[in-house]
Amino acid sequence: MSAKIRLYVEHPLGPGQSVELTREQAHYLFGVMRLAVGGHVGLFNGKDGEWLAEVSAAGKRGGTLSCVEQTRPLQMPPDLWFLFAPIKKARTDFIVEKAAEMGAARILPVQTEFTNSERIRQDRLQAHAVEAAEQCGGTFVPEVADLQRLDRVLDAWPEDRQLMFCNEAEVGSALRLAANEKGQPWAILIGPEGGFSDRERARLAALPYAHVVSLGPRILRADTAAVAALTMWQQALGDWS
Ligand code: SAH
């Protein structure tokens, strides 16, 4: 048996475990989704897989669920970081949602020289990643990091992590990912609407762990480029094959 409604909780899940609901969760389950005592929910917390849980108490401001059985084990995404320069709010939300759906393990907003926004709402973006996992049947939720400067991220880069550098200056070139680095830690980098500066491009291209790629013969908007790059990576090196 599996439940139609899936809910992320910050609570350990296990046999017989009871889970107290927050006010918002109770409102969603009992007010919006009209669940009642005896109804079923799928729960996940990013660590213990997915659990079928039964409503044992339902109120306006709270409620209790009881875990019945594990319905799916934890499925980890590949070790892939997704770095992107935040753009307008709605498009940034879109990028985080898609990166979570597409199986990024960690999402890192980075400030580049031509990044327009200097601040992000990390908590909002994290909530988008949670919602995406609830929607797409994921049992893992990627962490969304706070905004950091790209040059500082590169200063502290773990050298065993490969970097797929999506460089718009290579538009139309034949540079693609070679499928021979499978199983290693990876990252994808997408620039802002204004693209990368010459200085950034020179530094990135010279990094020993960087793989410069083109995303085809057209310049894509950053949000489109994000999905295209994640698709290309998953197909060549990730869990699609
Ligand atoms: N304003 C820039 C384009 C920026 S596109 C210009 O006209 O040159 C936003 C980001 O998407 C880029 O920084 C890059 O990371 C990615 N991107 C878009 N199209 C691409 C392509 N054809 N090849 C590689 N990366 C691309």
Image: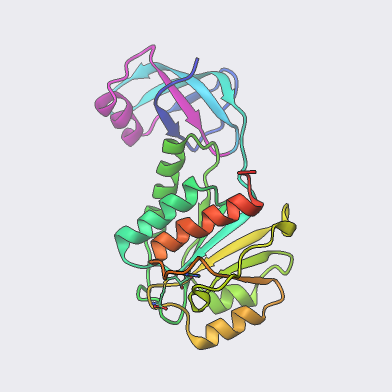
| 24 inside magenta stretch | yes
Q: Is 182 placed left or right of 71 in the picture?
A: right
* Ligand 1, image quadrant it occupies: bottom left
Figure colour scheme: rainbow
Q: Is 14 placed left or right of 181 in the picture?
A: left
Instruction: Name the quadrant of the C terminus.
Output: top right
Residue 171, placed above or below residue 11: below
Quadrant housing residue 113:
bottom left
| 210 inside magenta stretch | no
The residue positioned 48% from the left and 58% from the top of the image is: 228
Q: Residue furthest bottom?
A: 199
Q: Residue furthest top?
A: 38
Q: Is 121 placed left or right of 32 in the picture?
A: right
Q: Position of residue 107 (x, y in %)?
A: 51, 57
The residue positioned 60% from the left and 78% from the top of the image is: 204
Q: Give the number of callouts.
A: 0
Point out the stretch of residues depicted in magenta: 21-46
Q: Position of residue 99 (x, y in %)?
A: 48, 53
188 and 235: which one is in front?
Answer: 235
Q: Position of residue 25 (x, y in %)?
A: 35, 33
The residue positioned 61% from the left and 62% from the top of the image is: 187
Q: Is 30 placed left or right of 65 in the picture?
A: left
Q: Position of residue 10 (x, y in %)?
A: 49, 38
Residue 200, placed above or below residue 73: below
The residue positioned 70% from the left and 67% from the top of the image is: 158
